[in-house]
């Protein structure tokens, strides 16, 4: 069940309006606009030689829960037995399949399969720049508003748990941390967004930083190196 968060929270009207305005008319970025770990394309370019040359296409749903008192973002904690990204914090999503009409279809299908979120409860707002993943994927993030207090059915083979984080917290640049992470024979700059006893990092944190920029945040502002 997606339940309303406890405690006081700011009214969501301004954030909701900004999301709709800033994401209206967006489209999947393609190769030229792809990011690595939330870095702008011009910064990502220096790391491309560390990544697979022919990434597989994938898509994720960035589900923003439209509570009456505040907006939150729903995350999944990946099952520990998975081959890729086991135990990590992520969004519902996966590889684009031959029968999918595009990234929206992939994201909605995967969200229904992984957490039981039915497409009729989802309002797609737009897209963030594609994310390049070290494991060999190019991921299109599909941002959407989701109705609150829905019953969810987790696929235990893929998802160990779900949890929510206030969108306002995730959009606060003071909560974005910056570090260098080994990859192959080199290192890349990645973001961390700690929340309670969990750490949102890698591509998931990168998508949130991309959302922060899309909504008017300055690139790199507030990040701690």
Image: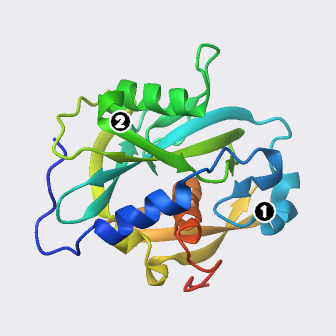
Mark 2 Cα shell of 10 Å, populated few (<14), some (14-19), many (≥20): many
Q: Which mark is residue 172?
A: none
Residue 164 place in picture, x, y as percent? 28, 56
Question: In this rendering, would 40 be left or right of 164?
Answer: right
Task: Give the image quarter of residue 221.
Answer: bottom right
**Height in image: 147 above or below 109?**
below
Asked whether the viewer can see residue 27, the reply is yes
For this rendering, which residue is in front, 9 or 161? Answer: 9
Q: Residue at x 86, y 64 (%)?
A: 46
Residue on which the image places disc 2? 159
Q: Residue at x 60, y 28 (%)?
A: 95
Element carrying mark 1: helix
How many marks can you see? 2
For this rendering, which residue is in front, 4 or 113? Answer: 4
Element carrying mark 2: strand
Q: Which quadrant holds the N terminus?
A: top left
**Height in image: 138 above or below 9?**
above
**Height in image: 22 above or below 90?**
below
Residue 210 place in picture, x, y as percent? 59, 63
Residue 181 place in picture, x, y as percent? 66, 66
Task: Give the image quarter of residue 161.
Answer: top left
Q: Residue 41 carries which label?
A: 1
Task: Give the image quarter of residue 188.
Answer: bottom right
Q: Residue at x 63, y 42 (%)?
A: 139
Q: Which quadrant holds the C terminus?
A: bottom right
**Of the image marks 1 and 2, the number of the one nearer the N terminus:** 1
């Amino acid at each position: 069940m997606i339940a309303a968060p406890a405690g006081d929270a700011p009214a969501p009207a301004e954030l909701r309006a900004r999301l709709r305005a800033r994401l209206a008319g967006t489209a999947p970025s393609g190769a030229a606009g792809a990011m690595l770990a939330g870095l702008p394309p011009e910064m990502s370019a220096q790391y491309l030689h560390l990544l697979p040359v022919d990434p597989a296409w994938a898509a994720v749903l960035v589900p923003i829960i439209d509570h009456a008192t505040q907006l939150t973002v729903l995350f999944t904690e990946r099952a520990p037995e998975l081959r890729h990204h086991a135990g990590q914090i992520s969004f519902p999503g996966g590889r684009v399949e031959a029968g999918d009409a595009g990234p929206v279809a992939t994201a909605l299908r995967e969200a229904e399969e992984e957490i039981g979120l039915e497409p009729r409860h989802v309002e797609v707002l737009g897209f963030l720049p594609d994310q390049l993943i070290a494991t060999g994927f190019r991921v299109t993030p599909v941002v959407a508003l989701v109705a609150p207090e829905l019953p969810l059915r987790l696929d235990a083979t893929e998802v160990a748990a779900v949890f929510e984080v206030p969108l306002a917290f995730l959009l606060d640049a003071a909560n974005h941390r910056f570090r260098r992470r080994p990859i192959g024979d080199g290192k890349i700059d990645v973001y961390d967004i700690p929340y309670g006893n969990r750490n949102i990092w890698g591509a998931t944190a990168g998508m949130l930083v991309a959302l922060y920029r899309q909504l008017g945040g300055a690139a790199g502002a507030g990040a701690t190196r």
